[in-house]
Image (cartoon, rainbow, N blue to C red):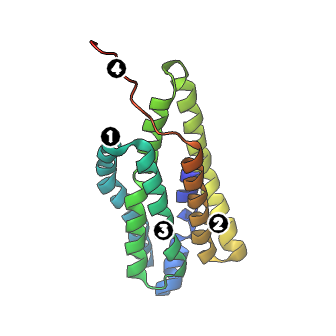
């Protein structure tokens, strides 16, 4: 769900930027900046969020990232200023940078060693499914309802993921150590 939500906006960023700034000669550059600024924010936030995961828990960081991703995606649907949109893309990148690392770390700790390979195979398949279905559905929503709806749908998917993690995913607890060990 996380990859699906993150990737839905992929096919429409250039169109959305064009809607904001018009048909400028540097449109591709402006769209590239708006798109890639999210990746830059990922690079900045991932080490910090990884460190926080070790301290406050993987589930908690996952919940913070999903809530932040939802709250920073939603306003993009209503933005008509390129620089504000780019700042919002940066903000969403700060949160989504922690989704996959926290989820994978949590899976690695909640699943027994014997099942870990199979479960990582399933999570990898789910990630690739989200990577392919997200842009496909994002493009279909944009074509059917308009560009703004893609951001609204993405925020809804992230909020649904937040609720699912909150209600269904347990926090990892270190096994109790025996006295004298």
SS for tag 2?
A: helix
Alpha-carbon span between mark 3 and mark 1: 24 Å
Please report contact status of discs 3 and 2: CB closer than 8 Å, yes or no: no
x, y percentage for residue 48? Answer: 29, 50
10 Å crowding of disc 1: few (<14), some (14-19), many (20+): few
10 Å crowding of disc 3: few (<14), some (14-19), many (20+): some
Q: Is residue 117 above or below residue 156?
A: above
Tell me where residue 77 sits by quadrant. bottom right
Residue drawn at x 40%, y 53% is: 97
SS for tag 4?
A: loop
Residue drawn at x 44%, y 66% is: 35
**Residue 139, label in figure:** 2
* Marks 3 and 1, the one that precedes in the sequence: 1
Q: Look at the image and tell me whether residue 26 can be seen.
A: no
* Marks 1 and 4, the one that precedes in the sequence: 1
Q: Nearer the viewer, mark 4 or mark 2?
A: 4
SS for tag 3?
A: helix
Alpha-carbon span between mark 1 and mark 2: 37 Å
10 Å crowding of disc 4: few (<14), some (14-19), many (20+): few
Q: Look at the image and tell me whether residue 163 can be seen.
A: yes
SS for tag 1?
A: helix
Name the residue tied to disc 1. Answer: 54
Name the residue tied to disc 4. Answer: 177
Name the residue tied to disc 3. Answer: 71
* Marks 4 and 2, the one that precedes in the sequence: 2
Give left or right: position of 120 versus 95: right
**Residue 148, label in figure:** none
* Marks 1 and 2, the one that precedes in the sequence: 1
Work out which residue is located at the far top of the displayed protein and give it: 180
Alpha-carbon span between mark 4 and mark 3: 40 Å
């Amino acid at each position: 769900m996380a990859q699906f939500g993150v990737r839905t906006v992929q096919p429409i960023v250039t169109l959305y930027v064009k809607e904001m700034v018009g048909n400028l000669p540097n449109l591709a550059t402006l769209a590239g900046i708006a798109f890639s600024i999210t990746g830059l924010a990922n690079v900045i936030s991932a080490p910090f969020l990884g460190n926080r995961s070790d301290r406050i828990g993987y589930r908690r960081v996952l919940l913070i990232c999903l809530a932040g991703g939802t709250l920073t995606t939603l306003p993009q649907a209503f933005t008509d200023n390129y620089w504000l949109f780019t700042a919002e893309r940066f903000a969403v990148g700060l949160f989504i940078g922690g989704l996959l690392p926290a989820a994978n770390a949590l899976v690695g700790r909640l699943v027994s060693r014997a099942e870990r390979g199979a479960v990582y195979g399933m999570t990898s398949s789910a990630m690739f499914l989200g990577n392919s279905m997200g842009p496909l559905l994002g493009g279909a929503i944009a074509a059917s309802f308009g560009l703004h709806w893609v951001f609204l749908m993405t925020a809804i998917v992230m909020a649904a993921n937040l609720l699912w993690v909150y209600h269904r995913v347990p926090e990892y607890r270190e096994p109790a150590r025996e006295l004298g060990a």
